[in-house]
Image (cartoon, rainbow, N blue to C red):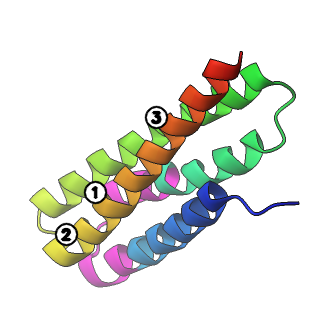
Amino acid sequence: MAKSILAEKSFKFSIDIVNTYKTLVKEEKEFVISKQLLRSGTAVGALIREAQNAESSKDFIHKLAIAQKECDESIYWIDLLNATDYLNKHKSDELSKMSKELLKMIKSSILTVKAKL
């Protein structure tokens, strides 16, 4: 089976999100917003993985559409954590760059499959 660049990047993003969550809880004692980021950030990769086993093209699109929403939500939580000084600019920029890249890739995948329908 060929490796999916989208699946690989989303898995790395999930790892970075988990590590960021651990840091926010341990060092910043931030438990609420970081939990939201953990949920949405790790959901992206899980949904992409789920889409790989979709029952149809429409199911694939549906799962990626949810991943797209979760990715966009993650960007919101990253921005909020940065604006409230829980995340430093460097980490915020790094996570934002990764999530925006994933978002573009997800959107592109959805458009490609829709064009084939």
Q: Residues within 10 Å of mark 1 (few under 14, many from 20)?
A: many
Instruction: Return the residue nearer the eye: 5 or 16.
Output: 5
Instruction: Label the magenta part by its dominant secondary structure.
Output: helix
Any mark on residue 4, and which? Answer: none
Looking at the rendered structure, the kind of residue marked 3 is Lys
Q: Is residue 22 magenta?
A: no
Q: Report which quarter residue 104 is drawn in.
A: top left
In the displayed image of the protein, which residue is found farthest to the top? 117
User: Which comes before the other along the chain, label 3 or label 1?
Assistant: 3
Mark 2 or mark 1: which is in front?
Answer: 1
Residue receiving disc 2: 86
Give SS at disc 2.
loop
Q: Determine the residue positioned at 28% across, 45% down.
A: 76
Whether residue 75 is situated above or below residue 91 in the rendered picture: above
The answer to whether one can see residue 105 in this image is: yes
Residue receiving disc 3: 69
Instruction: Return the residue nearer the eye: 56 or 21.
Output: 56
Looking at the rendered structure, the kind of residue marked 2 is Tyr
Give SS at disc 1.
helix
Q: Is residue 19 left or right of residue 80?
A: right
User: Which comes before the other along the chain, label 2 or label 1?
Assistant: 1
Residue receiving disc 1: 78
Q: Is residue 95 left or right of residue 110?
A: left
Looking at the rendered structure, the kind of residue marked 1 is Ile
Whole-Å distance between the Cαs marked 2 and 1?
9 Å
Residue 107 in the image, given as x and y percentages of width and height: 48, 35
- Bounds of the magenta span? 23-39
Residue 34 in the image, given as x and y percentages of width and height: 36, 61
Whole-Å distance between the Cαs marked 3 and 1?
14 Å
Give SS at disc 3.
helix
Whole-Å distance between the Cαs marked 2 and 3?
23 Å
